Amino acid sequence: MAGSRFCCLADLLHLNAAGFRSVGSIGVGRLRSGVRGSRPLVGDLKGLTWREGRCKSGGMEAAGVDSTGRPFKNAEEMWREEIGDAAKGIEDGKDWYRKGIEYWEGIEASVEGVLGGYGCLNGIDVKGSDAFLGTLLEERFGAENRRLVALDCGSGIGRVTKNLLLRHFAEVDLLEPVSHFIDAARESLTEGGTTDDGHKATNFFCTPLQEFTPEKGRYDVIWIQWCIGHLTDADFISFFKRAKSGLKPKGFFVVKENIAKSGFVLDKDDNSVTRSDFYFKQLFNKSGLHLLKTKDQKGMPGELFPVKMYALSTEKAGQRKP
């Protein structure tokens, strides 16, 4: 459903384990929030007051919180608890990623499933992405006679590829670690063959983002939506450093993600982290990326996390390679 009707939302309201009023979440190619479903509204827990992703006590603001309401002083403390201490050589993210995959293996391979019960937001999401992407393609490539190729990361069932990317790109490759999602995408996107203008989904990679290295110089755009929250900070940086080689000259990344108002929110159900805008920009900087443009997604219900789009390049403005 492409419109502004959110009648489905009332049915999804529930109280989570911390007693916060929240709604179902959205993730890999699907909406996701750090607290299994979204931004909690208002609640109290052990003297801490939660509002808009911030946890305050005695005037001091914690850097982050998990979906049980537990605050963390900083991201390093959270990651030490989740995956171990890298400084002591005991960091291990295997369980972290395994739990995330197990969660999504239990989700139905449908638009409603991958959007966490928010299938009614599909059209709004696609419309916002299309406006953002269209402007970028015009600015970067103009009237070049260029056969455009994209990579859809965290592609899920191919929702973004089908509704957005195939409008603009002659070829789209899909990357998704959940096998029944990528199988559904393959079936849906190869059934009809090419689009009327000859565009097609070409490759279907059932590989985790943190293990994937793209073919050198294949892509004009690498699109990463509602999936980067599953990566640890170290793997986030490592992924982008590897993925740079997959871009053609003038190519760029687009990251579309939920945004915490400050710090971060750790979802203990699906092992994902909703990061703040500042947190994202720190990681982009450490990855050697430069912001081309940002835009807020409009039209999302107020009880969900805000959603932001980032366009990123490997070179600073004015240093573009020919």
Image: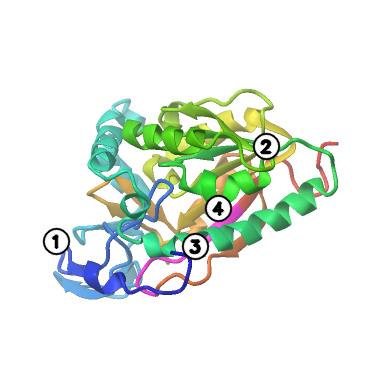
* Quadrant housing the N terminus: bottom left
In the figure, residue 92 lies in which quadrant?
top left
Q: Which residue is mark 4?
A: 281
Going by the numbered disc 1, the residue's amino acid type is Ala
Query: Which mark, by number, is residue 123?
Result: 3
**Residue 233 location in percent, x, y?**
43, 41
Going by the numbered disc 3, the residue's amino acid type is Gly
Q: Element under label 2?
A: loop
Disc 1 to disc 2, C-alpha distance: 49 Å
Q: Number of numbered discs present?
A: 4
Disc 4 to disc 1, C-alpha distance: 31 Å
Q: Which residue is mark 2?
A: 198
**Residue 219 location in percent, x, y?**
66, 33
Q: Nearer the viewer, mark 1 or mark 2?
A: 2
Q: Earlier in the sequence, mark 4 or mark 3?
A: 3
Disc 4 to disc 3, C-alpha distance: 28 Å
Q: Which residue is mark 1?
A: 17
Relative to residue 233, is residue 57 depicted above or below?
Answer: below
